[in-house]
Image (tube, rainbow, N blue to C red):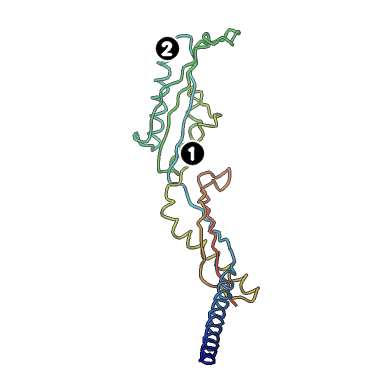
Amino acid sequence: MLENNKLSAFILGVFIFLGLAAVGYQLSNAAIQVKEYERTVTAKGLSEREYDSDKVIWPIQFTETSNDLTQLYKSIEASNSKITRFLQKQGIKASEISLASPVITDKSAQQYNNAKAEFRYTALQTITVYSEDINKVRDVMKSLPALGKSGIAFTGNNYQDQTEYIFTRLNEVKPEMIEEATRNAREVAEKFAADSASKLGKIRKASQGQFSISARDKNSPYIKQVRVVSTVEYYLSD
């Protein structure tokens, strides 16, 4: 009876050992496979294109001076009418022209100004052209100095009032640019895989960079350079 119990215990122990060995082998094999899948390569792909702007904001500023406030406003109104007529004659639509309220400075009210100014009042007036016809507006810009000969003192040195060109079609070009950036990233990853005697696997994770829009150069602000970088991580295998 005792011998039979010992034999049964021995056989049970053998089966337990074999079972644990099989489980250990499977876990070891799985660990090796997981480790292989952890081999990755990260690549960046660039897409960069140039597009024409589709809107322009053109602020036209001029100044008027006078010692009489009533006369100052009359001068502003006369210059506004002259500039507006000129713009419309050049092909700018009335709906594309807007007038801001003039900014009046009373020099006699400035405590830090001890010197007696020739004119007490100075006005800064802004007329803004907002248009989608960029070529038309740029042509009119070139002819504006001719209007200055009529006695209008144009200004244009304020940084915040410079002409602004806008590109609003980003959503239209996004899909193609993302596709191009991702394709470029894959080409880079494939080259790396080939150099390391590996094969490129599936995508582990990917992230789309932020789109940036900037002027192509300082002399062509109406031509925009749109840029995006995609970062893609791939699995590698032997």
In the picture of the structure, the residue carrying the numbered disc 2 is 71
Disc assigned to residue 164? 1
Mark 2: secondary structure: helix
Q: Give the residue displayed 50% in from the left and 45% down from the top.
A: 222
Query: CB under 8 Å between callouts 2 and 1?
Result: no
Mark 1: secondary structure: strand
Q: Earlier in the sequence, mark 2 or mark 1?
A: 2
Task: Name which residue type carries label 2.
Answer: Gln
Task: Name which residue type carries label 1.
Answer: Glu
- What is the residue that sits farthest to the left in this orientation? 95
Classify residue 237 by image quadrant: bottom right
C-alpha span from label 2 to label 1: 33 Å
Q: Position of residue 169 (x, y in %)?
A: 42, 50
Which residue is at the front of the view, 5 or 11?
A: 5
Q: Give the residue displayed 58% in from the left and 10% down from the top.
A: 113
Disc assigned to residue 119? none
Classify residue 232 by image quadrant: bottom right
Q: Residues within 10 Å of mark 1 (few under 14, many from 20)?
A: some
Q: Position of residue 46 (x, y in %)?
A: 55, 59
